[in-house]
Image: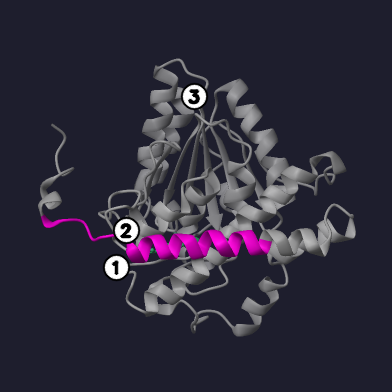
Amino acid sequence: MSTRTKKPVRPSTEEREELLELYRQMLLIRRFEEHCDKAYRQDKIGGYLHLYIGEEALAVGFISQLNSDDRVLGHYRDHGYVLALGSDPKAVMAELYGKVTGLCRGKGGSMHLYDKEKNFLGGYAIVGDVIGIATGAAFTAKYEGSDRIVLCFFGDGAMNAGLFHETLNMAGLWDLPIIYIVENNKYAMGTPVELHSAETDLAKRASVYGFPSETIDAMDVLEVRQHARRIIDQVRQTKQPYFVEAITYRFVGHGAADITDPGSYRTRQEVEEWKQRDPIPNLANYLLQNKLATQADLDQIDQEVHQVVEEAVRFADESPDPPLDVLWEDVLVD
Ligand SMILES: Cc1ncc(C[n+]2csc(CCOP(=O)(O)OP(=O)(O)O)c2C)c(N)n1
Ligand SMILES: [Mg+2]
């Protein structure tokens, strides 16, 4: 059932506002994380930090097509999901700074974001775990007889966890309303897909559980959005799972310790080639060429995003650390 899909038709001019919003969201994630990189080096952000730079089109394109009560779960590279869902950038930055005003009151940090209000049911640091938890959320949606669907984002490395196969089998058996999205960014840390997966066509590898699977190009936000619209509609209607292999690339290192270093596992030339497909300038060019925006429009969005990030940083900087006595709160359910 694995298929390679063709490039869809470009959207019409009526969608101008929506396209500008996609642009704004991708730029926000990019600028927000560029600051995170800096703040990590200044020891303002502790623990681990994994950036989504280069992969923004995927989260933004898919999440833009959800209903507000749908649910999203992801792995530890999770800043893009919450920002695309509309979480308050101030609370997200404060969380990364470990401050009490953060999304999780400063106790989660970068890898464990959670925003109940926006239906983001968590970023999970243990590779593969999110797949089981998200399948549980999809079971809940079905059990409650609701119309909700669940998006579950994880990396290519996570497909080697036993849980992946156990839960996709259950989802197929029970017809759960979930879209599994593997972010195939070619590497699990420094290990290329060719070395960790016996079958490198990941959509094919996931095609044996009784529901559809396909590969999409996730470097082009318009293409992602088009596929997302179709796939989300289908899952909502059929209440059957769907598997998406999203081809993407991270422009920065795997994690905090190797943020700017392309590393010995890939060449600088490879990184430079993928940067030619950077979804942000490419959308800007598309908007300009098709007269959907002027340079002044884009500059204004740039300015607004800059201000949002500056405010978030100021808020995080000025917020207090959590008091010591909250250490014992939120540990066990009553
Ligand atoms: C069970 C488990 N094993 C090992 C790790 C350490 N680890 C963190 S990220 C990572 C690589 C995961 O790669 P992938 O799933 O492709 O996601 P990406 O980082 O490329 O987004 C590993 C092995 C972990 N967090 N959990
Ligand atoms: Mg990967």
Which marked residue is nearer to the observer: mark 3 or mark 1? 1
Judging depth in this view, the residue of 277 and 156 nearest the camera is 277
Magenta span includes 323: yes
Q: CA distance from mark 3 to mark 1?
A: 38 Å
Q: CA distance from mark 3 to mark 2?
A: 34 Å
Q: Residues within 10 Å of mark 1 (few under 14, many from 20)?
A: some
Q: Which residues are drawn in magenta?
A: 302-324
Question: Tag 3: residue type?
Answer: Asp
Residue placed furthest toward the top: 145
Q: Residues within 10 Å of mark 2 (few under 14, many from 20)?
A: many
The answer to which of marks 2 and 1 sits earlier in the sequence is 1
Q: Which mark is residue 47?
A: 1
CB contact under 8 Å: marks 2 and 1: yes
State left or right for residue 177 relative to residue 256.
Answer: right
- Image position, residue 51 (x, y; %): 48, 65
Residue at mark 2: 109
Q: Quadrant of the N terminus?
A: top right
Question: Tag 1: residue type?
Answer: Gly
Residue 103 shows up from this direction: yes
